[in-house]
Image: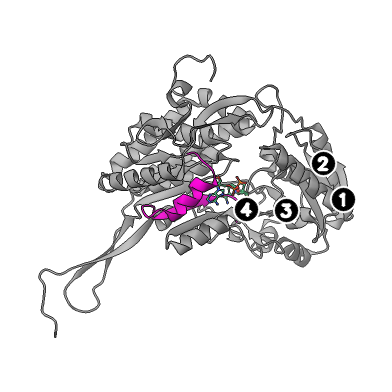
Amino acid sequence: MDGAQFSFFDDGTWSGKIYTGGWVDGSGGADEVTAPADGAHVASIGRATPADLGAAAKAARAAQPAWEATAPADRAAILNKAAEILEANAGELIPWIIRETGSIPPKAGIEIEHSAGFLRAAAEAAQENQTQTLASVDGRGASEELIRVAHGVVGVISPFNFPLILSIRAIAAALATGNAVVHKPDPRTPITGGVMIARAFEDAGLPSGLLHIVPGGADVGAAMCEDPNIAMVSFTGSPEVGAKVGEACGRNLKKVQLELGGKNALIVMDDADIDVAASNAAWGAWLHQGQICMATGLILVPSATAGQLIEALGTKASHLPVGDPAKEECALGPLIVEAEAKRVEGIVEDAVAKGATLHVGGKPNGTLFPATVLSGVKPGMRAFDEEIFGPVAVIAEYDNEDHAVELANMSDFGLVASVIGTDVRRARDLGMRLRVGHLHINDQTVTASPLAPFGGRGRSGNGCRISGPALWEEFTQWVWVTTKPAATPYPF
Ligand code: NAD
């Protein structure tokens, strides 16, 4: 950062560069990264082109076999070291995350803490013995094994909202299982989503050629899906772009992992403590301005207790300061760009025009959007039907449990659902009727673990998972190996 002493994250090292075989110029020149809060210059970052992507993929493919042959304990040591480096330099990295992504300090801290967790979980997994021995069924005396092998080069494409975690969770899994990586962070957040990761692995001693960071736009992402040296693409982002990535990878017969959006219901049961339910809903709906795939997108409440919940949420919303987290204490920072704030305002206006009630918020000031409470939201309103990706608590009333399940399952998405209630058994039984990939009883929707397979159903993804047992399932493939003591003749 301007005026800083030489340090772990000294921008003299990486300013205006991409990371491919070291810090080098990108063929596309350099882009300015600006702060979403005030548009101020944050840093300059190199811009890769499809040609840079192609060269990076080729170099990654050449480096990968030696990495896959490296002892798992040595691969794990590098992943663990990268985790230590992120944590040790958190004090320097967090201000960059705050400025570049508009995160409040606790959210920026979560990026470091969880990213270290994903690296350590991947290091642990790298050392698991995944080989299986099969019984030989044809009496030919062959010993038979199933061995997991790396795909080769994994391409990673990540979004702007949690750039460090959402990039590292795939990069760590790919490296742990013996793959090389070419990674394209979102062009709005390439420092948190790319440079930090490169610096951590550089200092951790990852051999050259195994990790390439190629910041760029859609053209670079699209080239990744076509490149013959890339065997798998791990994409996190919107369903619209995910569909394009899936289509291109399908055409090129590449494995593709699609982690897409969410419209996540939080159901308040009739026996719930309303104040606690309101605080869960507030955190789920407004953390990081609602720009989270797991954000609470629909709060379902019995008609009898709706008034109490609306009042509690309204009080909270009106007390949450919105501002520039780099300059002042606030609970909500900016949305990523002003066009997003306008889009969210349009969703609120549509709901109000169709009969919903706006209690608090709803009007942006530049990129700043206040915590907003909308009630009386119904199917057919954009606030009910769409992923909002902004700080809007959307409240809809239900008549009975079947009605709550029907409303929650109306979404095309299927990432997360939460149920809050005193009778845990009843809450869980209801939750199990929801079509989702994560279900939380007595918790809000924004919850992830490096040990749990992350992913959703329907429009939330293509059924692939990431992390936990999914790490090996997704980032490797089986090879069936049979070994006879000697070759024997066949009838021909
Ligand atoms: P986005 O789809 O616009 O962008 C994601 C990435 O795709 C960026 O790096 C972008 O440059 C790249 N890209 C754009 N066009 C491309 C193309 N044609 N080919 C290849 N790559 C291309 O998403 P966004 O708006 O930045 O992020 C918000 C979305 O991400 C929301 O829908 C959110 O729910 C979703 N998300 C999902 C998860 C999850 O794990 N399921 C996590 C976070 C965010």
Mark found first going from the N terminus, 4 or 3: 4
**SS category of the residue bearing label 2:** loop
- Please say whether residue 130 is visible from this viewpoint: no
Q: Secondary structure at mark 3?
A: loop
Q: Which residues are magenta?
A: 215-239
Quadrant location of residue 36?
Answer: top right
Callouts 2 and 1 close, C-beta under 8 Å: yes
Amino acid under label 2? Gly
Residue 39 image position (x, y, % from top left): 66, 28
Callout 3 amino acid = Gly
Q: Which residue is mark 4?
A: 261
Callout 1: 10 Å neighbours few (<14), some, many (20+)?
some
Q: Is 437 in front, or is 335? A: 335
Answer left or right for 225 relative to 277. Answer: left
Q: In this picture, is 91 found above or below 249?
A: above
Q: Nearer the viewer, mark 1 or mark 3?
A: 1
